[in-house]
Amino acid sequence: MISARLKRRDFVGTLVGSTLAGAALYAQTSNPTVKMVPSSGPGNDLITLPGGDRVYVKVSTQASGGALFMTEQPIDRRGSGPPRHYHEEQDEWFYCLAGEYVVEIGDLGPRRVPHAFVYDGAGPGRILIGFTPARSIEQFFRDLEKRGQYFGNGSPEHKELAHRLYGIVNVGPPLKL
């Protein structure tokens, strides 16, 4: 595992480059024409996660033809972040817009490599997170909002449900600062 400290505007270049190349390849093979429009602000499409964390949808699965799902996630609480997990079908990348995050990934964070992040700032932070191809990850966030509690953190049955429905495998607790 590699642990990296991301500050405002830091970029995991090779990770993003390989992820965007994968999205372009996916778009070429599944839907070569994708019309994208800029969002008019962070309140366009808001998903509220259990515990109150917010996820602003910047590029929806539908808008990208399934090639990409992108979110902006403001985080105000130091120590907040998901459990260590991996995705069966998506590559995930991170771009820090404000604040400071600790990100733990394997060699580039491709699918099936465990990863996690935790907010390590004194004030508000914002992180841009992309998934390619989108597959069922947007539905995961929407179902979390409806469900009101996380999948995969409790019983073996909950972990199996998260794996079966969304291809997400939790392999450890959230990162500690």
Image (cartoon, grey):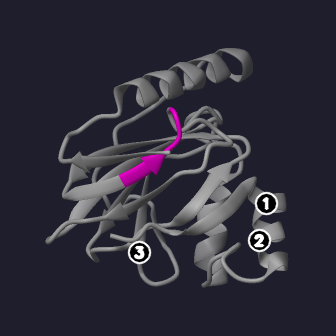
Mark 3 residue type: Asp
Instruction: Give the residue displayed 22% in from the left and 57% down from the top.
Output: 100
| Residue 157 magenta-highlighted | no
Instruction: Give the residue displayed 63% in from the left and 17% down from the top.
Output: 25
According to the image, label 1 marks what residue?
Answer: 163
State yes or no: discs 2 and 1 in contact (Cβ < 8 Å).
Answer: yes
According to the image, label 2 marks what residue?
Answer: 159
| Residue 106 magenta-highlighted | yes
The answer to whether 13 is drawn above or below residue 125 in the figure is above
Characterize the local packing of mark 3: few (<14), some (14-19) or many (20 or more) Cα atoms within 10 angstroms.
some
Q: Earlier in the sequence, mark 1 or mark 3?
A: 3
Mark 2 residue type: Lys
Task: Give the alpha-carbon distance from disc 2 to disc 1, as whole Å.
Answer: 6 Å
Q: Say which quadrant the C terminus sits in.
A: bottom left
Characterize the local packing of mark 2: few (<14), some (14-19) or many (20 or more) Cα atoms within 10 angstroms.
some
The answer to whether 111 is drawn above or below residue 43 in the figure is above
Q: Earlier in the sequence, mark 3 or mark 2?
A: 3
The answer to whether 148 is drawn above or below residue 140 in the figure is below
Secondary structure under the numbered disc 1 in the rendered image? helix
Number of numbered callouts drawn: 3
- Can residue 58 be seen here? The reply is no
Residue 139 position, x and y percent, is 67, 59
Q: Which residues are magenta?
A: 103-107
Towards the viewer: 24 or 153: 153
Q: Residue furthest left?
A: 123
Secondary structure under the numbered disc 2 in the rendered image? helix
Q: Nearer the viewer, mark 1 or mark 3?
A: 1
According to the image, label 3 marks what residue?
Answer: 53
